[in-house]
Amino acid sequence: MSKFCMTRIEPPDWAAQPGRSITGITVKDFANIQRHRDKMLKVVHREIEEYLNNPLLYFDGNDKGFPHRSRLTGEYYVAREAYIANTIRHGSRSALCVTA
């Protein structure tokens, strides 16, 4: 099977506007995080492509389920972003959760 290449697109007109939630992060820290958003989205992109190119993680042929390679267009969009600060023993960390 050939490599499945993905393209991130803007949300289509029929889709809900992308959601964004921010929990426990200051305005200053959020601004700093946003300076790295493109890098983070590149990581998301790479992970999506790796997932859809692992035959153990997608359906094909007569299999039923999602994601099914024959039904995928090769395009995705970010539907939701969540920025969450987690306090851990040695300080705080933030996490980015993206729904694509």
Image (cartoon, helix red, strand yellow):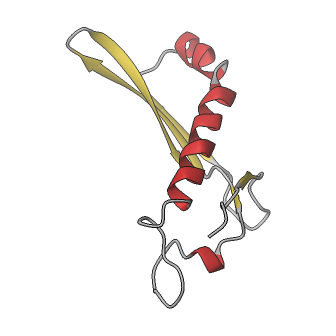
Image-quadrant location for residue 95: top left
Count numbered badges in the picture.
Answer: 0
Quarter of the image where one finds residue 28: top right
Residue 99 or 70: which is nearer the viewer? 70
Q: Position of residue 35 (x, y in %)?
A: 67, 18
Q: Position of residue 1 (x, y in %)?
A: 62, 70
Residue 18 to residue 43: above or below? below
Q: Quadrant of the C terminus?
A: bottom right
Q: Is residue 81 above or below residue 50?
A: above
State the residue at coordinates (46%, 20%).
25
Q: What residue is drawn where x is 49% and y is 60%? A: 54
Residue 14 position, x and y percent, is: 75, 68
Rendered residue at 57%/47% (across/down): 80
Q: Residue furthest left?
A: 89
Residue nearest the observer in this picture, 83 or 9: 9
**Can residue 91 be seen in the rendering of this structure?**
yes
Residue most extreme to the front: 1
Residue displayed at 48% across by 69% down: 58
Could you tell me residue 75's position as x and y percent?
A: 72, 60
Residue 92, by quadrant, is top left
What residue occupies the far bottom of the structure in this picture? 62
In the rendered view, tell whether residue 48 sits above or below residue 83: below
Q: Is residue 65 left or right of residue 42?
A: left
Is residue 100 visible in this depiction of the protein?
A: no
